[in-house]
Amino acid sequence: MMGEEFVSLSLTPLLIGVFAAIACALPGNFLLLRRQALIGDAISHVVLPGIVVAFLVTGYVSAWPMMLGAAAASLLAVGLIELIKRLGRIEPGAAMGVTFTAMFAGGVLLLEQTDTSAVHLDVEHALYGNLESLIWLDATGWRSVLDPQALAGVPDELPRIFLTLLAVIAFMRLFWRPLKIATFDTGFAQSVGARPTAMGLALVVVAAVAAVAAFDAVGSIIVIAMFICPPAAARLMTNRLERQITWSVVFATVSAVLGYVLAGYGPLWLGADHAVSAAGMIATVSGIILAMAALCAPQRMRSGAPAN
Amino acid sequence: MLTEALTLQLGYNATLVALGAMFLGVAAGVTGTFLFLRKRALVSDAISHATLPGVGLAFMIMVAFGGDGRNLLGLLLGSALSASFGLLCIGWLTRRTRLAEDAAIGAVLSVFFGFGIVLLTIIQTMRVGQQAGLEGFLLGSTAGMLWNDAVIIAVGGALTLAVVIALRRPMTLVAFDPEYAAARGLNVARVDLAIMGLAMAVTVVGLKIVGLILIVAMLIIPPVAARFWSERTDHVALIAGGIGGASAYIGAGLSAVAPALPTGPIIVLVSFATFLISLLLAPGRGVLAAVLRHRRFQRRVHIRQGLLALAQGQPIYERYTLRLLQRAGLVEADGVATETGRARAAKALRDEARWALVRSDQALEGAAALYDGLRDLETVLTMDQITEIDRRIGAPQGVAL
Amino acid sequence: MNLKLASDLGTPPTEDLSGVPLAVRGMTVSYGQKPAVFSVDMTIQNGSMSAIIGPNGAGKSTLLKAALGVIKPLAGRVSVYGKPLKSQHHRIAYVPQRASVDWDFPTRVIDVVLMGLYRELGLLRRVRTSHMETAMACLDRVGMTDFAERQIGQLSGGQQQRVFLARALAQGADLYLLDEPFAGVDAATEKAIIAVLKSLKDDGKTVVAVHHDLATVSDYFDQVFLINTRKVAEGPVATTFTAENLNAAYGGRLATAQIDRLAVSAL
């Protein structure tokens, strides 16, 4: 399993899965604490209309325009949700529900009306992605990792999601303090000039960028699951934000690796001869981790004032 | 063709599906209203995504017992069971851990859906699985529907609607004011359970028509649109039912004539259009009305403040205030009050003095509660009362009212 | 609803207010169509300890929050030491209502106090020993050093309020604005907080608190600002906290006997 075949068939999908999971889990921590966990759900739904419109405008399937389209759709959705919430005085959950279902419906309708049979663009692909197919054909073993010629054949998704992950980490590092202060105490953040409104918006934009880059590689199921499950499980492990972030990265990584391995090899161990959806399996594993955390993590209960 | 579709002349199946969809739309709109008013609209999103593993497992079990696995009733039963399990998980996560409900909803919907996809990929590799058409449950498809399926949908829609109508009173009470409902002896937890159960019934019956990703729109959009038109719970529910029923009927009818138009998205987009119209144009809560009202209100505040400043000989700092006063002919371009301006300013100051008295007098407490800095005293008190107040202030008489 | 507002918090009034810690001019704040605060002028004296008092829903907290730019006013101007609010964040310390935050947030007491050093630490500067010492000293002033490592969710209401005060102390500001600092705290905490506030005043700082307990006004404060949507009166407690003004602010909501007992004129 660790040989030549592993490098060319499994290394790149594994790395892409892990990077995507971490890129989503990191902003997910703050979304969770801000009670905006479902923003991730909304964003992952509106990515579909974004890429469909990008395809209709440019006329061909190519990653960058589609990512731009998806990012634009996410921003449009977030703006619409805010607008409906404020102007219509509608509670956030309902405002989200209205926006993402309508945009998703628009995406499906456009897709059905367009001839996309020649290109690889369909709803199922958008949902489960195609992690298994992101293989590295030029690799001939571990030596290829240092071989520039072979590296040129790495699937484009890998550098894209890696750069996105670096950008997400840079954002979190740079704005760590104002993010934390604005999440904990908006009024105080405003009074010390930590710009809580701008921070909230920036967080959503970063989450959207992470979602779009991850979506491009792995589909929207992982995106929603990774926004919520690893941070939620991590929250139950510790009462320190710094440690929560670390745990969420660990959980995201374990979900991605274990999910990928189980999807690829699990059925074989059970005697079946076909792999199952890796994206679905990664989401499932993250759910199992959350369930275990909810059952026995040290800080799973709300803390009350102690008797002293 | 369109008129034929909308007047039910496209054959039994299409007619049954359109009627079923309409019943379902009404039931969804009404049930969704209660979810929305209980601030739990997105629970429906978790319910619908959590149906997928049930569909997959039911198919596999039916095949294992020698069936062909496509029995709609069996599949819907499976979906209902797994959705209930999803609901239980949400309840358990929010009660037993420190996680908030939104996180629990997100976790359940993504994990159940992910597991459902795993099951679907397994089914695709089964010999009978290739033509199972379970993907139809993702986005809904009414094309090529069997007579039996159409009957199930029509009957299911009608039954759900019947239960909604039967339970509308307790649900209205609980949605409007749960504490009052509890005081009246209603079991709030049980009514909440009924609302959830109905949301699940709507989801399950609607799976085949709209698909699980979009069925939540039928539970969310019509109530939100209806909310703009009324402040009364029962009216909102009624309007939501109307919007839901009409959207579903039009959606099902349109896609019967034009198979390229998928039912689910059409239904969602029709109801979204009514939402947009409501958001922008509804009187009272609509955006346009609110903007106009706010503008008018802001102008009144600035003019009033400007007048008070003039009357007390204080400078007016804000350019916007000055501009408004100037436009109303109350000050000259150099900021000096005109004659009308002086009179209005004196009256404003006088009114403030009167209000101050009203608000410190226990006997006038009812009127005092209406104070907002802008309200004319004459709309609250009688002329006699005002004269009496002026007498108590004792200041110069005869300021023009 | 936050539609575009024509207010102009950026530029201070043209009068000379350089010696005035906080001046509010023509402030109107409205939730929907009913102003919570209408055309209010407020001038806080340097080195004073001022109470903002008024009945429930009179706009006390709203006025404070609008003065800080936490909520947007419909009209009005704010000057802090004669300059626009934007340039003066470093001179203000704000203690919000305890109930305004989620105490289940995953953080420790000491981390909350360190938030008070935000302006000094900026985005990337490391927390050094000196910063930790400052934070611990502030915790010491409110008697909470033993709780530094405690998770904030484990604190009682009074302890939470002390932590908030310690965070404000860490800011090293000149003007302290507190929103209902004594709401729902135990007697020991109330005593501890007022001792800290008095020591701030002795150091020449200015303290403004939204206050709801009329019985303690004359013990705790030297200046008072009475509001009931409009300003009712402002000035020294001795001349302003009178039966007449209380009556004007509270209207029928306070029994006359009560007013006579509380007001300074009857002391």
Image (cartoon, rainbow, N blue to C red):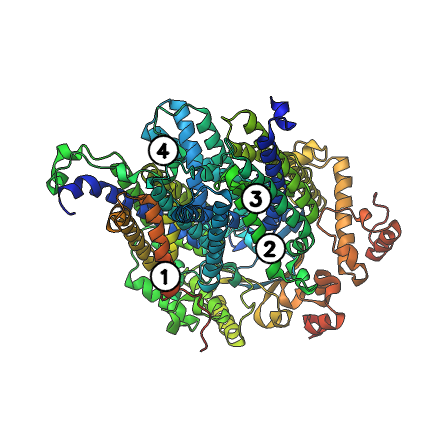
**Can you tell which quarter of the image residue B17 is in?**
top right
Front residue of this view, candidates B165 and A32: B165
Q: Residue at x 44, y 28 (%)?
A: A111
Q: Which mark is residue B219?
A: 3
Q: Are marks 3 and 2 on the same chain?
A: yes
The residue identified by callout 2 is B194
| First along the sequence among labels 3 and 2 | 2
Task: Give neighbour class at mark 1: few <14, some 14-19, many 20+ (Cα, 10 Å).
Answer: many
Type of the residue with mark 4: Met
Q: Position of residue A295 (x, y in %)?
A: 39, 64
The residue indicated by pointer 4 is: A67
Label at residue A293 = 1
Q: Which corner quadrant of the image does residue C171 belong to?
A: bottom left
Mark 2 falls within which chain? B
Q: For marks 1 and 3, give the CA distance.
A: 32 Å
Query: Looking at the picture, which amino acid does disc 2 mark?
Result: Ala
The single residue placed furthest to the left in the displayed view is: A143
Check if mark 1 and mark 2 are on a common chain: no
Graded by Cα atoms within 10 Å as few (under 14), some (14 to 19) or many (20 or more), the crowding at tag 3 reads many
Disc 4 sits on a residue from what chain?
A
Q: Are marks 4 and 1 in one subunit?
A: yes
Q: Nearer the viewer, mark 4 or mark 3?
A: 3
Q: Which amino acid type is marked by label 3?
A: Leu
Q: Position of residue A156 (x, y in %)?
A: 25, 34
Labels 4 and 3 within one chain: no
Specify the quadrant that holds the C terminus of chain B. Answer: top right
Identify the amino acid type marked 1.
Ala
Whether label 3 touches label 2, CB < 8 Å: no
Q: Badge 4: few (under 14), some or many (20 or more) residues near its Cα, within 10 Å?
A: many
Residue B357 visible in image? no
Of circles 4 and 1, which is in front?
A: 1
